[in-house]
Image (cartoon, coloured by chain):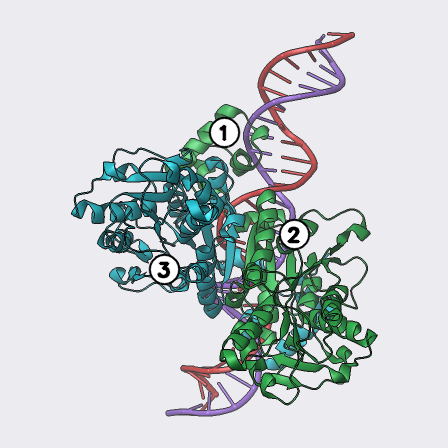
Chain colours: A green, B cyan, C red, D purple
Amino acid sequence: MKPTLQAVADAVGVSRSTVSNAYSRPDQLSATLRERILDAARQLGYPGPNPTARSLRRGFVGSIGVLFTSQLSYAFTDPFAVRFLAGVGAAAERHGTSMLLVPLPPAVTDARRAVENAAVDGFCVYCVADEEWALDVIRQRGLPFVSTAARDDASADERFVGIDERAAARSAAAHIVGLGHRRVALLADSVLPDAPAGPLTVAGVDQVPHPTTRGRLGGFADAFAEVGVGWAELTLVNVPGNSRSAAAAAIAGLFDQPAPPTAVLAGSDVLALGVLDALAARPAHDRPTVSVTGFDDVAEAAAAGLTTVRQPAEEKGRIAAELLLDPPADAAAGHVLLPTELVVRDSTGPVPRS
Amino acid sequence: MKPTLQAVADAVGVSRSTVSNAYSRPDQLSATLRERILDAARQLGYPGPNPTARSLRRGFVGSIGVLFTSQLSYAFTDPFAVRFLAGVGAAAERHGTSMLLVPLPPAVTDARRAVENAAVDGFCVYCVADEEWALDVIRQRGLPFVSTAARDDASADERFVGIDERAAARSAAAHIVGLGHRRVALLADSVLPDAPAGPLTVAGVDQVPHPTTRGRLGGFADAFAEVGVGWAELTLVNVPGNSRSAAAAAIAGLFDQPAPPTAVLAGSDVLALGVLDALAARPAHDRPTVSVTGFDDVAEAAAAGLTTVRQPAEEKGRIAAELLLDPPADAAAGHVLLPTELVVRDSTGPVPRS
DNA sequence: GATCCAGTCTGTATCGATACAGAGACTAGC
DNA sequence: GCTAGTCTCTGTATCGATACAGACTGGATC
């Protein structure tokens, strides 16, 4: 049996309240009594107020939840997600707040339960693919949250930090357009739920459920529309899961087709690196010259010479946590758009004349 | 005001217990009543049992803590730590348990408080530099924990997962010895607390407080002792903090000295990569041929052609969490030694004749 | 017809603390 | 000497649930 606060009170001969004050409000009692109490606590092996009981009474927990759609174990393998977490961590650190990483079971019913059961004061919602249900639960619990994916139906007072996905993607595509490419492939993760890997036909970009993916694909399409290349002329390639190997597998066959794309615009650096892998896997004499762009500018992108759109990752995490931990009085300030920048490297170049 | 379980009970006209059972023990009431209750809850906007209250009453929380010595934000920048976390995450996921990342303030008093206040059922202690105080708090709280750094005073029933640091380090050093190197530098993070960056004299390896660092340096020294090169003949270089840039800065001056080392054995890949950075930063005509070894075998090591000692990172995290989440009945099984492997790449070679 | 039992539901005690109003003791001020 | 005002400390109510023993049905068993 661990001793309780009551046990310490009895040992010293004071009331429970006084012992509680000794820990939580030292100014409420004399220094000597406080010392006596802490001594007695040490002697009894009392480890300090029970965090759970304290949270219940105080009405807050002192930790924020971070929600990933994907498997928790996957999140740690995504370099962008890790940098986001680092940012959240930095802010949490400054506030003396812990971070709770909540794994979501695959079934939505179970996942709802997991969000309901998380002992946190609020959530940073990292780009949950189909996040509506999660936000529902959070709202129902009356907890504050910050989301990182722009949603069309976001109410004005919802806090958000992110980028203009569409404009950012458009800048990458404009670069490709400027290099003369007209026959291109767009590569994205989970374009439609449960869609197979590889080329996919989608009536319009607004059919894509995931807001981030929709935004990026839309931005790509915008730039091509401007030079008369319509949505239907773009090859859309689906990748089930944001991984290098999945991207490589999904794109591989494309270069053997009659009129292969001269450029591939990927929805993330991880996917783009997979495309480079797929190209590198071919024998040198049969390796087409393909321009490739990514998105995010993770560390590996620089090493691989990948042209990409940089977005500030740690910053995103840091601001998300800060918006959560001390919300701005002004509702407008709760909606933060971060800058992005096209970083041109070696992976893109003019269309090869053949 | 959020409705409570009591409110739902009143609305339906049943007792609190029954509503509680509707959520937590569906077999304890008829399906129809359960539906009636859940409907009423939906209607009232009751978000399910309050996690904190539930934890208090049940006596457990459903989350495990992960403790880093270092800054939480730093942990996410250390590739090995991230892979460890991924492993913990994978195991946590399988058990439906959340992970609480607890930032530790720099002052020990505050840090103790942080560990005392963490609402968790146990801890994975990731190589806390001076971890004794943390383990004290955890023991006092009566919580189980798994540590990843072998400690000399570990009691038999303490759970542990790690590697034989000394033997692993020795294998790297033996490789260097075999290549003929005798004038070498050992590079490690925080050899002594508050020691300055750069060469450092330490009477013996047992003066080094951090058990992991001590183990690795000891292993390096063992291999050299075997060929008659004593501790005093080895150049020990301190790096304050496990980062590439700090390592580069700490080692830079060494190569301009009269008899520079022909090999550098680093206590981690991150440090070793910093050494390679420092070498690469020199003009080609003034770039000595130096063998460099790392430790961990993170992703960047392979890309950089770094010879290193591989240890299974995700595995370590996964097993740590599993030892915590379902402890083996047999105490001996609570002490897991993982295999390591010397991975020889391009960064090491014979001593250049000059 | 008495007994048993499984299936449902209730009531009370309890988890371990903090909030808040207020009670004494003591010093100041007039 | 009396009212105020500070400092300390106490007592009760409360946070929001779950555990567990027991009460009440209604049908099966003998």
Position of residue D12 relative to residue A234, above or below, is: above
**How far is the residue under mark 1 from the one under mark 2?**
42 Å
Pointer 1 local density, CA inside 10 Å: few below 14, some 14–19, many at least 20: some
Residue B300 point in image, percent of width and height:
46, 59
Badge 2: chain ID: A
Report the residue marked by disc 3: B346
Front residue of this view, candidates A58 and B256: B256
The tag on residue A34 is 1
The kind of residue tagged 3 is Asp
Name the residue: 52% across, 58% down: B55
**How far is the residue under mark 2 from the one under mark 3?**
36 Å
Name the residue: 28% across, 51% down: B351
The mark lying in front, picked from 1 and 2, is 2
Report the residue marked by disc 2: A315
Residue A38 point in image, percent of width and height:
45, 33
Please indicate whether residue B31 sits to the left or right of residue B149 in the image.
right
* Helix, strand or loop at mark 3: loop
Position of residue A266 relative to residue B174, above or below, is: below
Q: Quadrant of residue B121?
A: bottom left
Quadrant position of the N terminus of chain B in the picture: bottom right
Badge 1: chain ID: A
The kind of residue tagged 2 is Glu
Residue A20 point in image, percent of width and height:
54, 38
